[in-house]
């Protein structure tokens, strides 16, 4: 790497974890790849952390058109979400947990949008025009799922859109904690449609600060995401690009050392184990 170092650059130890997750050349046709996938990943991490426009990437990275091309291609192929899932399961195994959680925490965050365009709405409660980020995290704060939609969608409706797509993908999940904004009909819907228990954690006193049981975990995850300047607002035209940057940010977080005491040797072994399990599961579903 013949350039100056940026704080977002992937270290050698992190690259040993992330390299197996990136796609290799699948055919002998076409020109040989002229850019390093490690440099592509460094550039994408730089955009997420620094919050700059694609066109303002420093010139010592590959051309911005190339970097954006890889980002959007991997977004459309579902690669960011797939790799995030593998890393999250490996991180849980390294933390002496089961690969899939039995409990989760649900919450949303409203952020402003810019003149870039795309779907948006007005959140009357927060008095913000923009989008909502609905996330579901495990008890470690690791992301399980994310859905970005216009801010005028009610929390209960947004939660239905998020949770309905997870039925069958989280086999051990039994309990979800959420705040009072999700109380009411959603509790019955979750029980009947998803066969999970939605537990509402309410405030005991108004206008006083108190760390609420379980809910602080998802607030900490939002705090992690807010460190990425690309996520300080929603700068993307497409909601799926916003979701991709959230996955990118969590991938970068999980690849750093240390994270919840994880060690890279364990992460590497667990990634291989999770990949084999996922492959067997996909084969079994195809046979069915």
Image (spheres, rainbow, N blue to C red):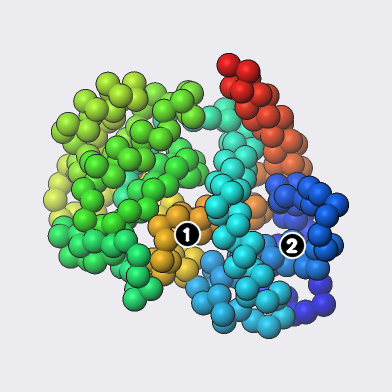
Residue 241 drawn at (x, y percent): 47, 59
Judge the density around disc 2: few (<14), some (14-19), many (≥20) Cα neighbours within 10 Å: some
* Image quadrant in which you'd find residue 75: bottom right
Tell me: 216 left or right of 82: left
* Image quadrant in which you'd find residue 128: bottom left
Which label is found at residue 241?
1
- The answer to whether residue 26 shows anywhere in this view is yes
Residue 172 drawn at (x, y percent): 48, 23
Which label is found at residue 214?
none
How far is the residue under mark 1 from the one under mark 2? 21 Å
Q: Which of marks 1 and 2 is in front?
A: 1
- The answer to whether residue 8 shows anywhere in this view is no
Tell me: 130 left or right of 181: right
> What residue is rendered at 47% in x and 68% in y?
230
> What residue is rendered at 60% in x and 68% in y?
68
Element class at badge 1 = helix
**Viewer-closest of 83 and 29:** 29
| Residue contact between numbered discs 1 and 2, judged by CB atoms under 8 Å | no
> What residue is rendered at 57% in x and 60% in y?
72
Which label is found at residue 38?
2
Tell me: 59 left or right of 231: right
Judge the density around disc 1: few (<14), some (14-19), many (≥20) Cα neighbours within 10 Å: some
| Quadrant, the N terminus | bottom right
**Viewer-closest of 164 and 45:** 164
Tell me: 166 left or right of 259: left
Q: Earlier in the sequence, mark 1 or mark 2?
A: 2
**Viewer-closest of 175 and 217:** 175
In the image, farthest residue toward the top: 288
> What residue is rendered at 48% in x and 45% in y?
143
- From the viewer's perspective, is residue 14 above or below residue 81? below
In the image, farthest residue toward the front: 29
């Amino acid at each position: 790497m013949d350039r100056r170092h940026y704080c977002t650059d992937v270290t050698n130890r992190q690259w040993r974890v992330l390299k197996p997750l990136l796609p290799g050349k699948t055919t002998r046709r076409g020109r040989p790849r002229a850019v390093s996938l490690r440099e592509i990943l460094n550039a994408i991490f730089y955009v997420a952390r620094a919050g700059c426009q694609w066109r303002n990437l420093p010139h010592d990275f590959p051309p911005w058109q190339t970097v954006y091309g890889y980002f959007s291609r991997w977004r459309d192929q579902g690669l960011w979400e797939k790799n995030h899932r593998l890393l999250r399961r490996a991180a849980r195994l390294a933390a002496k947990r089961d690969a899939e959680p039995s409990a989760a925490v649900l919450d949303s965050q409203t952020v402003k949008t810019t003149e870039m365009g795309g779907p948006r709405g007005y959140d009357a409660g927060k008095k913000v025009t923009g989008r909502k980020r609905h996330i579901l995290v495990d008890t470690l704060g690791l992301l399980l799922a994310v859905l970005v939609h216009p801010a005028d969608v009610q929390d209960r409706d947004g939660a239905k859109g998020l949770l309905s797509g997870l039925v069958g993908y989280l086999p051990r999940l039994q309990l979800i904690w959420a705040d009072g904004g999700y109380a009411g009909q959603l509790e019955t819907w979750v029980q009947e449609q998803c066969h999970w228990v939605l537990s509402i954690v309410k405030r005991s006193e108004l206008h006083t600060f108190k760390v609420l049981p379980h809910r602080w975990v998802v607030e900490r995850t939002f705090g992690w995401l807010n460190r990425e300047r690309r996520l300080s607002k929603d700068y993307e035209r497409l909601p799926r690009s916003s979701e991709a940057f959230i996955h990118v940010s969590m991938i970068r977080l999980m690849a750093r050392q240390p994270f919840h005491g994880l060690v890279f040797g364990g992460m590497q072994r667990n990634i291989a184990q999770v990949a084999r399990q996922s492959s067997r599961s996909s084969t079994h579903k195809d046979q069915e």
